[in-house]
Amino acid sequence: MIRRLQRGAAAAITVIAAAVLVVFIGLPLLAVFLRVPAGTMVDQLHSQIARDALRVSIKTSLVALAFIVLVGTPVAHLLGTKRFPGRNVITTILELPLVLPPAVAGIALFAAFGRMGLLGTQLHALHIRLPFTWIAVVMAQAFVAMPFFVRQAIAGFGSVDQHYVGASRTLGAGPTRSFFRIEVPLAGKSLTAGATLAWARALGEFGATALFAGMLPGVTQTLPLAIYSEFSATNFDSALAMSALLVAVSFVILIVTKILLQWRAV
Amino acid sequence: MTQDVREDALSVELRHKLRRFELDVRFALGRETLALVGPSGAGKTSVLRAIAGLLRPDSGRIVLGDLVLVDSHRHVRLPPEDRAVGMVFQDGALFPHLTVAKNVAYGLRPRPRGRRDRDQRVTALLERFGIASLAKARPVEISGGERQRTALARAVGRSPRVLLLDEPLSALDSVTKAQVSRELSRWLGELRLPTILVSHDYGDVVGLADRVLVIDEGRLIQDGTVDDLVRAPASPFVAAFTGGNYFAGEAQAGAGGVTEVRLEPAGLAATTARAHGKIGVAVDPWAIALVPGGPGEGEAARPNTLTGPVVQIARQGGSVRVSVGSVPPLTAEIPAERVAALGLERGTLVTARWAPGAVRLVPLSGEKSRTDSPTDASVASADAGGGAAEA
């Protein structure tokens, strides 16, 4: 009897907890869409600040994504298929931005590439100024989003049976051809999922960008920064409209990633 | 033609430290099918991988015709893609994201001139190996036998100068296995390529291999035809491997120049060959006669006799392999009609007998048996002892 009561209580607690969580996460997301009429929202997205922010966001996040994929793929391939001393150290360093507060990432980038930074003198000599440019936005985004891609890519390459690579080699394909024709297609789902997640993270980057790139409208002001700026200026409708856009995009990205990852092997 | 066969198409000499022992082999082959057999983990696949270039041997020299694949002294090591080696992996290793046709097209050599040429050659290969209807299928959609045919077609499409088959039959069910084995035998005959066939199953290589190399713990312990292996197994392992009967025992001189071997844990074998000390006894299954019933009066202690119930009756063509649960157990191979005539079925108590001439003494590997006169056994056992000491 007592046992049955206990079991009933446990089930009830689980149901309540689930309900609390769903409401806690779902309600604010829903509120973003419901606070302001849809028509007003669309109008707000046509404002100069919103259009500039959208343009900056798309440009910088895509460039960051390209950089992440180009640099991250070979590194992930190495880490996923080879065992060597120092491998864990490299993996840990690459994963660090996952747990690092974005503000710290921004300060760190500043300390390295800023005017007074570690490489400041050298960059100045080359007439390269990074902080407060759109390149700085890309750097901040790449810094925090890289691990999302690299982790998935390492797992993806690691799960490719090296038998296939061996077979490809004995069939006359060199390492490069084997990589593109066998390993990339077989790790394709993980690579795409990782790239999608990294892109979403880059799109949402705020802290590191704010510190390292500033909030220059039309140059470094991305959507999240524009939301903050409009919110500070009490333009609540505008902030909500841009937020709704980001929620929608994030939702689509998450769904796409889930579908990609759930596709069973061919 | 005969010269063609004698010419060494591939010579292999390699040493490589594996986890439990060192692989140390040296052999050569011409245009023949060489089976490399041995228990799982004996180093067979490592030999294949070293030839294919997928494993870097600690040292060695591998030469394919006029092409030096590996020469550790001269720091030569061709990458796998430059070795003209056709490898068929155990599970086929077909690329899962490509169709059967695209798998076969993957390694075509010489490189196809345009799409037409490629498609024609792929179709020709698919037809030759009887898989034309599967061209558009994915590897997961086809059967194990079809996968092996695709893998072979793919390897042959590469125009290899040597064919390496890693356990090509072991993943197949017994019906498919027999069929693929027949096909393989025909294709290997047509291709006339130097071929190394790796297998842990003796049955897989009979009928396919011109020559058999037995490898155990990284060392070659016998090189000969299938008949050689059956007639004169170089070790207990080889005897057991070929499906013969092998008993361990201790030999001592008996009356009238006869050597008596006290078998473990029971039984007695007698032969005119001479030996002393711990020794193996091999008896061909077809040299054993079965008589229903227990041993006759005073027969229990007679040599070359074992009694026990029939455990299994397995028909193989015209003959039947009868497993007898004697101590130690044995297998007899008798004509099918004898089984009926004797009324043998599972559980029937039978007495197995064989002639002293059917007893062959086999040295125990790693142990020196003291022999009174120099027989084959003593020479071979000294070798085995030396080998063990080195290892």
Image (cartoon, helix red, strand yellow):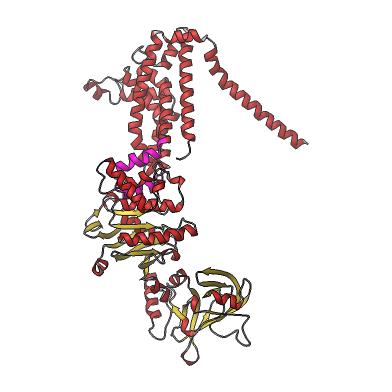
Q: Is residue B361 above or below residue A171?
A: below
Residue A128 visible in the displayed image: yes
Point 42% across, 58% down: residue:
B180
Q: Is residue A187 magenta?
A: yes
Quarter of image, res A194: top left
Q: Quadrant of the C terminus of chain B?
A: bottom left
Would residue B308 be found to the left or right of residue B133 on screen? right
Q: Quadrant of the N terminus of chain B?
A: bottom left
Of residues B358 and B381, which is closer to you in this image? B358
* Prevailing secondary structure of the magenta residues: helix
Q: Is residue B294 above or below residue B323?
A: below
Point 52% across, 82% down: residue:
B354
Residue B72 at x, y = what percent? 25, 57
Residue A66 at x, y = what percent? 34, 27
Of residues A16 and B294, which is closer to you in this image? B294
Point 37% across, 64% down: residue:
B35
Of residues A99 and B322, which is closer to you in this image? B322
Identify the magenta region: A160-188
Residue A82 visible in the displayed image: no
Residue A145 at x, y = what percent? 40, 27
Residue B5 at x, y = what percent? 27, 67
Quarter of image, res B182: bottom left
- The total of numbered circles placed on residues is 0
Outermost residue, bottom side: B256
Q: Is residue B155 magenta?
A: no
Outermost residue, right side: A1
Quarter of image, res B13: bottom left
